[in-house]
Image (cartoon, coloured by chain):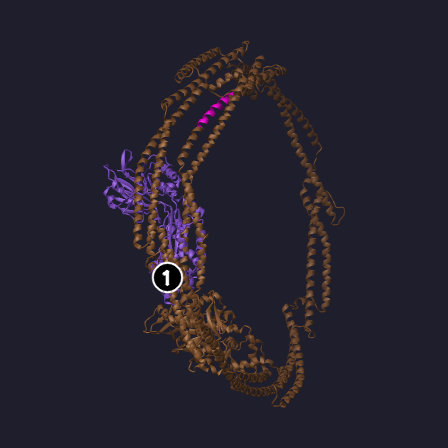
Amino acid sequence: MRIRGWQIEGFGIFHDFHVPDLPRGLVIVHGPNEAGKSTLLAFLRGVLFGFADRRTPESLYPPLRGGRHGGALLVEGLDGVYRVERTAGRRVAPAIVRPDGSQGQPADLQRLLGGADETLFRSVFAFSLDELTQMQSLSSEEVRGHIFSAGIAGAGRSARTVIEELEREAATLLKPRAGTIRDLIHKAQDLRGQIRSATATATDYPAVVREEQDTLREVERLRVCIGQSQASLNRTRKLIELWPTESELQQVFRELADLPVIPAFRADAEQQLATVKAQLEAVRSAAETATARLAELQAQREGVRPEARLGAIAADVQALADELANQRERLQRMVGARQSLETAGAAVRQAFEELGPGWTEERVATMDVALPSIEEVRDWQGQLQAAKEATAVAAQDLRQHGEQCSALEYELQQVRADIDQEPASAAADRLDALATRLESVGTNVASVVGIDARSLACASATYEAVARLRAGEREEERLQQLLEATKTSLDGIEVDATLDPVHAVIAAVARHLDAQRQRLANLDVSARTVADQQAVLDKALAGLGPGWNESGVLALRCDFDQVRCVRQFADDLSTAAARSETAARDVEAVRRGISAREKDLARVKDRLAGQEPTSAEELARKAARVRSLRTHLAELSELESRIRAEETIKKERARLGRPRSTPVQPVPKWLTPALLLMALLSAAFGAWRVFSQQDVVIGAVLVVLALGLGAAALAARVRAAHISGDDAPRDANVEGEDESTIADLRQRASETRARIVEDTASLGLPSLPSVRDVDECDERLQRERQARGKWDDASAETRELEHELASWRASQEERHQAHETCVRHEQACLSQWDVWKHANGLPQVLSPDAARDFLHEVRTVQERISGHNSASEVVASLQAAIARWEGEARDLVRLHHPGDDVGLDSARLIDAVADLQRRCAEDAQRRRDRARAAEELCQRENELGEARCARALARDAAVGAVKREVGRLCGAWDRAEPVRQQRRRELDRAARHLEEAQAQWQAWQMAKGIDRALSPEGVLDFFRLVLGVRDAIRRRDEANGVSDAIELATRQWIERAEAVAQAASLAPSHSAPDAWLDVVRALSTRCQADAEARRKATALDDEIERAVANVSQSEERLKKSDAEFLALLLEIGVASEEEFRTKLVVSHTRSGLEQRARELGGRIAAGLGRGEGSTRLREELATGRLSDWEVDHAGRSEEGARLQEAYDQAIRVNHDVGHRRQALEDASDIASLEIEHQGVVSELVDGVERWKRLRVARGLVTETLAEFERTRQPQVLAAASEYFGRVTTGRYAQILQDEEGRDVAIIDRLGARRTTAELSRGTREQLYLCIRLGLAHEFGRRSEPLPLVMDDVLVNFDPGRAREMAQELLEFGQTNQVLLFTCHPFTRDVFRDIDNAVPVIELPLEDVPESVVAGQRTRAEVQASEPSAHDDEPEEVLHQRVIAALLPGELGMSDLCARLGCSVDRLRPVLTALRESGMVEMSGQRRGARYRLASEADASEA
Amino acid sequence: MVSLRFVHAADLHLDTPFEGLGQVAPAVAELLRDASLNAWDRLVQLCIDQHAEFLILAGDIYDGEQRGVRAQLRFLRGLERLSAHRIDVFVAHGNHDPAAGRWSAIREWPPGVTVFGHEHVESVLVRRDDATLAAIQGISHATRAVSENLALRFRRGPESCPHLAVLHCNADRDPDHPLYSPCSLDDLRAAGMDYWALGHIHNYRMLSSGDCCAVYAGALQGRSLKPSERGTKGAVIGTIDNGAVTGCRFVPVPHVRFVEFAVDVADIADIGRLVARLDQGVDAELASGAAAGLVARTRLTGRGPVYRDLQAANAVDELLERMREEATGRAPFVWWSALRNETRPDIDRNAIRSRGDFSAELVRLVDALREDEPRLTGFVEGKTGDLWTSSLERASGNLDADLRSLVEEAEMLALGKLEPGSGE
């Protein structure tokens, strides 16, 4: 591929930049800095592979001069010129136009590029100096990766790094004893074991269920036993606990029988009697208290008498008293108000006196002293003061200017005289001193004539001229010294003429010197390898067995199909054997199963041997009999208990029965209501007679009669109640009922006994069995039931086992047949295997596994045979190459020393050639040095002449500059007189302005009516006096108003006090206003006392009235209480209170005993409970056999504890079995383990796949690397070595890969080995450039040659090597296109010296308008803003460099900074000085400013 | 005449283990462990809600007899519920739960449950109020591997009611399933049944409709991420009107759904967007039907800028962990089973081959291996020979893979590392 040209529409500084037809071969693109070389390199790479975008750190190169961002390349391929056009943007595909005008595809470009990608192109074909040196900054591994492993691609990473990465990743998965995969294998196996264990556990489930049911039955049995034992225990415990109660009950019955029988008392009689008595006493005491209180109140009322006259005026007096404090304050304030009034009047008078005569209050009020007037006065004050100050300043300036003019005129005359006396050969120092004086004088002149000193800038041009003169002197001296040194160097260089014929051919022979050495070394190694391989091969053939030779081994097939067949045979045989074994195991398992079941069947039948237990129906019938017997026995016991209880009650009743008392006549029931009715009628009629006042006496008698009838009714009611509450004898038929009940009970008992006899007869028990007999019978039945259950289970199990046995026997035959089939199949497989071995030539003794190993070994032997043959071929080729080179070397030796080489062996021949090579190289170097020195001598002489001319011109320029400065100063001095005249005029103008201001002030005073004699300050004081008078008048008027208001209020209060005092007949003690204060205070006190007396009298009257009513009520209640007490005694039926107390004691005793008996009876009944059992217990309790009960209780307790323990144990066992069953039912461990196992297996599969991928990938890279390094590297390095040897003129002979394959090493001409780190920077760059040339050469050999584009890569080369490299590049350009960008004319000239026809494209320096890039910082701008190494050079040198830089044309600030290598801050004052001196002109503003030399004349002077 | 519904389900595989999920979080493992049992409970509830007259279970009730008694008891609880609602159940055993297996936990079936034997085809009449609703025939597998065509034993009975048949079989010899009780559709039609309730194929499939309706109800709960186990699972609800089977429809039963979907990374710029795309995929799967949970496996395919991010060490594992963390607490639960990174570096093999560099040599080597199978086998065995006969193969099952695919993947892996612009 060749770049034919480009069309840049807009890219960086380029706009519409076309190069239509580039020449073939090497082309130099030359231009100064910022001409766009790097931009062009970026453009070329961008069009081919895409422009940089914002994600990349590289510059975007926006189109600074406009145009579409991008452009096109014209690329020449084998079939014509393609046009590749690309616009900058994110991954925009290029537009490709084929030679025939059709639209191309990206594949076309890829083909043109020979498959090279961007990284490869950047690394090998298009690079700048920075990118070239990146090789240096990269690590050794990276360098090696570029050069060797993926070197030809240039883009790849080191293959060995990739291998290590892959190996590392694979090792994390699997190592010999560790790794994720092995962990997963172990985990999977562990989980598999757990699953097997859990599965085996689950098969026990039916047995666990049966065990749980058995334990449950045992628990139930024990529970029943415990219940029975507990019932007996409770019975004895109850008897023991209730015996004390029973004993006490019997005692109570005995005490009751000893007490007399009395009528029943009301329960609350005693309490009622006490209540009535207490009420009577309380009522009597209350009546006495009320009477005493009434008398006391009446006595208090007599002492209280209010004053009637004060009541009318009490309100007015109170109002006056409320205002007493205000009146007192008014009197006090009146005195102060009068004093204030007098003080204000005096102040007004004093103010008028200060104002002067003739001023009245009206005139003061009309005077204008407002703020505007005051501000006007202050304005006048400021104007007058400013005018005075301006006049004084103008006078001072005029005086100082005169003094300066005199002094400077003298100094200027002195300088002019000195310069006129200066000789024509004045040195730079003298002119420098004159410039210093001129600078001082110029500064003073600028000050005097009133201009800016910097604008005059007197000495700056002189300084620059002097600096140029001084620089010229130093340059002349330096060139003189260089000339002398060059002459000395030239004289010291000598060359060897005997080597002239050798030079022409030494390079061709020596180029392969190291290769020859390597070949010799390789020959030894290869020969040893061949021998070793032969030995190993013989051993391997022997290992295969007797009769095997190479031809036999090579004839044997051991490819993949063979191995697969062997594996298939192995699998088939293994499967067949496994199946046979499994079938055999199945047969054995079936046999064992049959045996086990036969044993089980025999065992179960043993259990069935003997007599068959009672049938289940018979057992159920007997159980029903037992339950019936228990019921009847309990019923009989209950009946007997009841009979005994009835008899006891009957006896007790007979024993405790009361003697009969005297009969009492009962009260008729109708008597009490009749008496009450009559009493009501009498009371109503009598009351009517009394209130109607018809006959009061009859009415009163009727009322009394009513009262008597009421009392009689009450007595009749009491009597009736007494009779009904008496302990009357029972009804006569009660005894008859008792007898009947007992008989009935006995009848029922006899019937129950008959049923019991019937039950016991069928059960084989005594006719009247005890509870123990029944329990024993029940237990016997329980045992029979269990025996029956076992019998039934065994029968069912027998049937089940017989059924299973039948199916097992049927299965046994099937398994036998299956086993025989498997055995036949296995034998068939073995036969096939033997046939196959015979057909494929394998030994017949081999098993499939052994055959596979054998095939592996055969394949190994085959590979070794192949390797041995290859090694032999290598040895032969090496020997041929060695012979060829030795022939060439002997010719060379004969050329230098004819007839001297005949006896040289290979080693001596190599040494001789190496010595010749070294000597030729040294001689060639000396010849080049001598030529270079001669050339340099001529150049130095020319330069010295030029320097001398430049120094003379500089001196003339300096003297002229000084004279021009003096002339300019004299011209400037002429402007001093006009300045003095100007200042005088300014003084006159200030004086006139002052006079005008004073006249206007006086006119203003007249208009305002103010004394004209007053200054502005006096007027301001006068205004302040007027304002003081106005303020005094205002304060006096305010004091007068306050005094009048106080006096009016005082007078009104005194008038009201006089009216009240007159009504109360009081008068003040004196006539002063404050006397009324005492009068009002006295009246207020009297009114308050009178009001208090009135309130007290009213309260006493009310209380007396209530006390009278209270006395009446107390008397009535006393009468009522007396009547209630008498009625109560009558009701109780006693005559006195003592009789009442005696009967009450007896009644209480009986009630207590009866209550106790009921309590004890209830407690016993509660303790015994209800039912038949309780009756029997009651009878047993009545016997009182406490010792028997206690013995029985102890025995039952022990039995209960024993049963309870057994029961708890059975419960525990049942719970354990239940938990086991529940655990089996809920067991999710199998599912969980399966899930976990599947997860592990899944991960394992993934891991294995990953591991295999990694291993295979590693194998691919390893094999490729081996092949690549075997076939490629020597060619790349050989080519690079040749380039490098020529560029370094034989100093370095060879580039090698180091032992570890990780870096390159360099062999110098003496055979010493060096690393890249030991090379200088320039040499390293040469090395890297040569390696790239080698890589490019290798790439071109295999693919389309690509153009080589380099940006200033030779700058660090010394001239000699630069020339050599130029020579190599020119030669390289014969096959590959080479574009060399440079900003150094030297580099360009080196190429032209070699070949004058080398085409050069000059890039003009076209600056970019600053406005275009406003807001952007270009690289030049960034550099310009930063400090530079040139910032510390002398200013005169910088002046000179600036002028030199501007000679070609105008430049911007940033461009100047870039060219001169200094910062903006350093350059800006220099440019300012040059502008002020008139040497440089500026156009444009701010960032768009551009600088150029002022005129042709000035430029020529510079 | 009566109108009724019946439910047909199959392949419950109660307490089935799940395959190929990798190691799962404990909480998720618990949910998965109970997934098949919960699906059975939902089926029972479906029968109750639909007021079905009877339920037909066409084999593979349990996954295997080694699974413990938990599944049997859970199955029994469901049958008891159905019995309480007077829903008859007809069960035929399949290859996973053959009748000869040791199913010891259930000693007595609830009323209304019929378990068909394995010796001959049994016929049971479904009766309600002295009316015969249907005649159901069925036969169980005696052993795990039944090679007999059991369908040939079925013959329509004389009863004038709909005839239904229950069979666990491989109709039309589906190659993706074991060939147990193989039969053809013609065999089924020849029996003259109105409805064949089939089991063994784990996806719902209607083999024929019309007079002889033959339906695979599919599994009730997927067991892995295989294609046959993915997707919606459920049961078939059949209707009988006027003495004839008039229709059947598939009804999904909420279960833990296994899904797999691919995400093309071509337009995905970074991991964050990839996470969002993965979330969208799961949301779409959840929205496609009711599910009790979702187990997702995603294949990342294509070429894109995110390939570089995924090539970083543990990048895919970290992404998977992140997806799992973000899915925590979702209802229904979502478990990311795996992310398979099948993205490819931006590599053009043809372009590389046309170069003369190292990568080109590698590509040529791979091409040579692909064309020479013995050499390929020898090469792969030589690189992985340690593993070939180790215990690994026994532990992880059959690891025979396509050697060409293996070498191609390895090639991509190597090129991804060698070509900096495309990979690391």
Provide the chain ID for the residue under circle 1: A
**A1160 vs B45, nearest the viewer:** B45
Q: Quadrant of the N terminus of chain A?
A: bottom left
Magenta segment includes A227: yes
Q: Nearer the viewer, residue A1249 or A1267?
A: A1267
Query: Picture coordinates of residue A719 (x, y %)?
Result: 55, 14
Res. A1073 in view:
yes
Q: Dot 1 surroundings within 10 Å: few (below 14), some, or many (20 or more)?
A: many
Snapshot quadrant of residue A461: bottom right
Per the rendered image, the range of residues in magenta is A220-237
On the image, the x and y values in percent for residue A284 come to: 65, 23
* Type of amino acid at the residue the image marks with label 1: Ile
Question: In this picture, is A801 found above or below A1118?
Answer: below
Please identify the residue farthest to the right as the structure is shown: A1070
Chain painted purple: B
**A874 or A1410: nearer the viewer:** A874
Shown in brown, the chain is A
Q: Residue at x 39, y 24 (%)?
A: A785
Instruction: Look at the image and tell me in which quarter the C terminus of chain A lies.
Output: bottom right
SS at mark 1 in the image: helix
Please tell me whether the stretch drawn in magenta is mainly helix, strand or loop: helix
Asked whether residue A40 is in view, the answer is: no
Which of the 4 image quadrants contains residue B35? top left
Q: Is residue A395 magenta?
A: no
Left or right of residue A846: residue A661? right
| Location of mark 1 (residue) | A865
The answer to which of B263 and A678 lies nearer the viewer is B263
